[in-house]
Image (tube, rainbow, N blue to C red):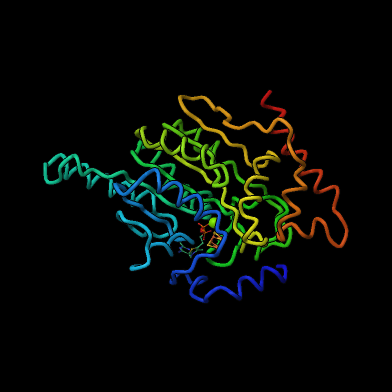
Amino acid sequence: MSEGRIKRMKELPSTHLLGTGTAMCSGCGGLEAVHQIYDVLGEKTVFVNAAGCMTLLSVYPFTPFRGSWLYTAMASAPAGAQGVRDALDILIEQERLPASENLDVVVLTGDGSAYGMGMSATSGALDRNLDFLYICYDNEGYGNTGQQSSSATPHAAATSTSHNYAGYKKDLFAIWAAHDPSYVATVIGSEPLDLARKIEKAKELRGPRMILALSPCPTGWDYDPKDSVEVGKLAVKTGIWPLKEYVDGEVVHTRIPRERLPVRDYLRLQGRFAHLFQPQENTALIDAIQARVDRYWDNLV
Ligand SMILES: Cc1ncc(C[n+]2csc(CCOP(=O)(O)OP(=O)(O)O)c2C)c(N)n1
Ligand code: SF4
Ligand SMILES: [Mg+2]
């Protein structure tokens, strides 16, 4: 782990890493996305949250949420969502709750749960055609416990459990689309109009819907918090994070970076990739990362 990242982690209140405090890191790209999503969804929601950084948002009296919140273990948020949805449906059917007070059930989960621990519970909820919105803020690691690698960690990234991550980021968008749900979309906080349009669309639909938000994480990715928006924009402009949606069996790209910037520009800003540039540039590995991105876009045409 780089000295910059160790310093930033030491500066956090100790409660942060224990998941029991109220501190969020400045420049948190996940928080930026969740804030924008909540602006569109509003208060008539129940958030069912899998343990992670965003759990810190629920701590009374500091919570910015004005609706309801249910905390679950990492793997269990979709099961919790099923229970809440069933309870609301039964109360409305028995006329113990007016239909006007119905709530949207929203899972809020990190990538550790979404790509890994919670995958089986999520697949089951999709099979049952559960009416819920599933938001994954993807900071590409177990952020709350010190950025251990997850199945969302990109190839070659340094994490607290890998100097040079050997795996490849799982394609969660494709895994969801294979279940043929109502809606799947990728978003990023640095593209707020694209994000708002997709949340509005998801809000109008019923059945399983996922919003997958790449979430630049200054603490885990090791860059200056002021660069969060820039890192997010580069993820889109280099083609590393395709903005797209799946609806009615079709995948549509909502932004196509016609003249893609080199992936170097994105990698170089982040301490987790510093070993690709120092003490000397690992050209072969950077070229291999570029080739995977090029292949993705070349296969589209
Ligand atoms: C079953 C289980 N194992 C471990 C933990 C401890 N834990 C709490 S948050 C967290 C990291 C979750 O990572 P992710 O889902 O990516 O969310 P992030 O912390 O990055 O926001 C872990 C391992 C837990 N709560 N439950
Ligand atoms: S560790 Fe990353 S995702 Fe978690 S609060 Fe800090 S910046 Fe946000
Ligand atoms: Mg995470």
Residue at point 88% right, 58% down? 280
Q: Relative to 35, is 258 on the left or the right?
A: right
Q: Quadrant of residue 73?
A: bottom left
Residue at point 50% right, 65% down? 24
Q: Relative to 205, is 168 on the left or the right?
A: right
Q: Relative to 300, is 53 on the left or the right?
A: left
Q: Quadrant of residue 67?
A: bottom left
Say which quadrant the C terminus sits in: top right
> For the view shown, which residue lies furthest in the right direction?
280
Q: Relative to 102, is 165 on the left or the right?
A: right
Residue at point 57% right, 59% down? 27
Residue 243, relative to residue 231: is it above or below?
A: above
Provide residue 56's location: percent of width, then percent of height: 43, 65
Nearer to us in this view, 58 or 42: 42
Provide residue 123's location: percent of width, then percent of height: 44, 42
Q: Quadrant of residue 101?
A: top left
Residue 55, relative to residue 258: is it above or below?
A: below
Provide residue 271's location: percent of width, then percent of height: 72, 61
Residue at point 70% right, 50% down? 155
- Looking at the image, how many numbered discs can be counted on the residues? 0
Say which quadrant the N terminus sits in: bottom right
Ligand 2 resides in the quarter of the picture at bottom right
Nearer to us in this view, 28 or 248: 28
Residue 255, relative to residue 150: is it above or below?
A: above
Provide residue 263's location: percent of width, then percent of height: 75, 44
Nearer to us in this view, 289 or 186: 186
Residue 192, relative to residue 300: is it above or below?
A: below
